Image (tube, rainbow, N blue to C red):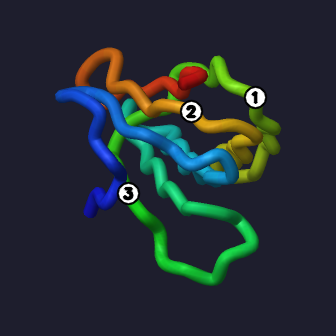
C-alpha cells in the first residue's frame, strides 16, 4: 500500500507534519516503515514500506521506541530509496 505522491522512480513527497513509524526487527535487515499524514489525524496510514530508514536530513523530531522510532516531520520532505529496501528522508 503506497498512496504517497511519487516525484520520480525512487522518491515520494512527505507532508510537513508526517509521522513515520519505524519498526526495526532484530533478526532481519528489513523492518517496516508506516507513514501517516499527521500524528493528530485519526486516519489510516498513507503508506507501508518494507525496509530500513537509514537517515533523516530534514527538520524532524526523532523519538526512540522499544520497537524502533517515530520520526515527526516539521517541514516538507522527500522519502528517497537510496538502495533496495533502504530509505532516507531529505529536505524538499
Mark 2 / mark 1, whichever is N-terminal: 1
Q: Is residue 71 found left or right of 50 in the rendered image? A: right
Q: Residues within 10 Å of mark 3 (few under 14, many from 20)?
A: some
Q: Nearer the viewer, residue 55 or 52?
A: 55
Q: Position of residue 6 (x, y in %)?
A: 28, 41
Locate the N terminus by quadrant.
bottom left
Looking at the image, which residue is at 62% across and 52% down?
18
Whether pointer 2 and pointer 3 mark residues with C-beta atoms closer than 8 Å, the reply is: no
Q: Nearer the viewer, residue 19 or 5?
A: 5
Question: Is residue 8 shown above or below 1?
Answer: above
Locate the C terminus by quadrant.
top right
Looking at the image, which residue is at 24% across and 24% down?
84
Residue receiving disc 2 = 77
- Seen as rendered, the residue at the extreme left is 9
Q: Quadrant of residue 60?
A: top right
Whether pointer 2 and pointer 1 mark residues with C-beta atoms closer than 8 Å, the reply is: yes
Marking on residue 91 = none
Question: Is residue 28 shown above or below 88?
Answer: below
Under tag 2, what secondary structure?
strand
Q: Nearer the viewer, residue 73 or 52?
A: 73
- Count of marks, rendered view: 3
Residue receiving disc 1 = 59
Marks 2/1: CA–CA distance: 8 Å
Looking at the image, which residue is at 54% across and 43% down?
24
Q: Position of residue 62 (x, y in %)?
A: 78, 37
Under tag 3, what secondary structure?
strand
Question: Is residue 52 shown above or below 14?
Answer: above
Mark 3 / mark 1, whichever is N-terminal: 3
Residue receiving disc 3 = 48
Q: Is residue 30 found left or right of 2 in the rendered image? A: right
| 2 vs 3, front mark | 2
Mark 2 / mark 3, whichever is N-terminal: 3
Amino acid at each position: 500500500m503506497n498512496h504517497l505522491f511519487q516525484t520520480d522512480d525512487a522518491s515520494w513527497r512527505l507532508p510537513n507534519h508526517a509521522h513515520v513509524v519505524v519498526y526495526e526487527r532484530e533478526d532481519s535487515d528489513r523492518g517496516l516503515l508506516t507513514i501517516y499524514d499527521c500524528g493528530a489525524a485519526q486516519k489510516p496510514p498513507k503508506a507501508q514500506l518494507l525496509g530500513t530508514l537509514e537517515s533523516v536530513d530534514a527538520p524532524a523530531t526523532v523519538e526512540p521506541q522499544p520497537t524502533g522510532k517515530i520520526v515527526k516531520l516539521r517541514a516538507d520532505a522527500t522519502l528517497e530509496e537510496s538502495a533496495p529496501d533502504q530509505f532516507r528522508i531529505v529536505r524538499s
